[in-house]
Image: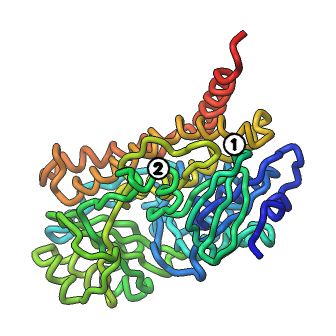
Amino acid sequence: MGLRQESIHSVGPKPEKRFSTAIVGGGLAGLSLAIGLVQRGIPVQVFEGATEWTDAGAGLVFAKNSMVAMEKISPDIYKAFAKRSSGQGWESKKTTYMDYRDGSTNGGLITSVICANTGQESVHRTLFAKDLVALLPSGTFHMGKRLVAIDNRPDGGYTLRWADGHSTDADVVLGSDGIKSKCRLLLLGEDSPEAVPKFAKEFAYRGMVPMERAIEVLGEEFARNSMVNIGSNCLTTTYPVEKGTLLNLVACRSIDTWEHDEWVVPSSQEAVRKDFAGCGSIMQKVISMMDKPAMWALFDHPECSTFYKGRFALIGDAAHASTPHQGAGCGQAFEDALVMCSLLDDEQVVSAADVEDALEAYDAVRRPRTLKIVNTSRENGEICMKRGEDTGDDLGKIKATLDERFHWIWHEDLDQQVQQAKLKMREVSKARLPSK
């Protein structure tokens, strides 16, 4: 027997919120949103397609805006994050977001990008997600629920149909099912060119190694702190995770097309060395630790005409998946969750009919910022592979650009963003009223 609408209504102490909410996707976007909604007394259930946890994605980095958003959604989320997070290892690096070095030579410093007050923090993605699940009430999180279709109900709600043959009714559907989002396909239409992710013309090798080994290979400074080594059509990124016990490794190469059906393809150390032949000594040391390399194609969602229709909306990577070159993609999921929680918690949103105004306001505020981040992340990848349109291989121009290009992301006034969304919701609601 499938989970039905009444089971969704079973969570949430505030009876005045007369709508049920289904979150499709149990990654960091969906989990943080669910925690925020539950703690605001809004009925919610989370449905994750995977049947078990994996280490896909491995390490994630965050800066000031991400941490502020976590705290504002729920102090419990931030506490879970702080338990896992690994900042820069050296005291002198506490405000450094990343050191950018010339990987074409011996790793000489180009610039240290500073994020005042917070620097950079990083976590192991899967372990952090498991901690967030533990913050949800029992019976709220469901694994093995792969979405196959969403049917519109006459009352304006939805019936979600799962691959296991069961179905669930909900008044509101929030899709957070990642870059390969089924929700995105259903919301935008399978024939829409915006519905599917776009190849970002690069791929990455990823790995994670014990810190002791990383120090032996890279030395204390490179292993303990966050580094990007830039080269011609390639880069490597390394940063500590899990309280500095592990080092996350990423090595990216540009490529015009992706010829494989799968996004992740097994590779070999020989292939990695060939891809990074001619790079400097420090990049060679990074790739030497890729024991079981696989090629990960990088895709993103650089455009989207809307994040919502009716009472159905997208958040996180389902809406605006990004390449990793600004370390900002996952942080935007927390901003999404903060704005969405704040809108649905607003006193104006009581019934299911009220939710559409909230989602229109969410779309108006979040879509321009997040899509800008997707596209500037692609640009930053170009810059750090010495092929930026305005920077090329000029290290002076690269330094000047890197020193300035992140501040608009980090120093966003999130309270103002929430207020802007609420004002927009009231404008939308007022415009819907019949004229006298």
Horizontal side of residue 102 vs 81, given as left or right: left
Image quadrant assignment for residue 11 = bottom right
Q: In whole angstroms, how far apart are the C-alphas of marks 2 and 1?
A: 25 Å
Q: Residue at x 78, y 48 (%)?
A: 19
**Numbered tag placed on residue 188 in the rendering:** 2
Name the residue tied to disc 1. 342
Residue 271 rendering spot, x and y as whole percentages: 19, 85
Image quadrant assignment for residue 215 = bottom left
In the rendered structure, which amino acid carries the disc numbered 1? Ser
Q: Residue at x 46, y 72 (%)?
A: 59
In the rendered structure, which amino acid carries the disc numbered 2? Leu
Up-down: is 91 above or below 52?
above
Farthest residue toward the left?
278
Task: Say if residue 118 shows up in the picture.
Answer: no
Task: Say if residue 408 shows up in the picture.
Answer: yes
Q: Nearer the viewer, residue 181 or 331?
A: 181
Q: Residue at x 30, y 72 (%)?
A: 204
For label 2, count other residues whose C-alpha is less than 10 Å away and answer few (under 14), some (14-19) or many (20+). Answer: some
Up-down: is 169 above or below 365?
below
Q: Secondary structure at mark 1?
A: helix
Q: Nearer the viewer, residue 86 or 215?
A: 86
Residue 145 rendering spot, x and y as whole percentages: 63, 73
Up-down: is 90 above or below 185?
below
For label 1, count other residues whose C-alpha is less than 10 Å away and answer few (under 14), some (14-19) or many (20+). Answer: many
Q: Nearer the viewer, residue 383 or 39?
A: 39
Farthest residue toward the front?
154
Residue 109 rendering spot, x and y as whole percentages: 24, 61
Residue 50 rendering spot, x and y as whole percentages: 57, 77
Q: Residue at x 59, y 82 (%)?
A: 52
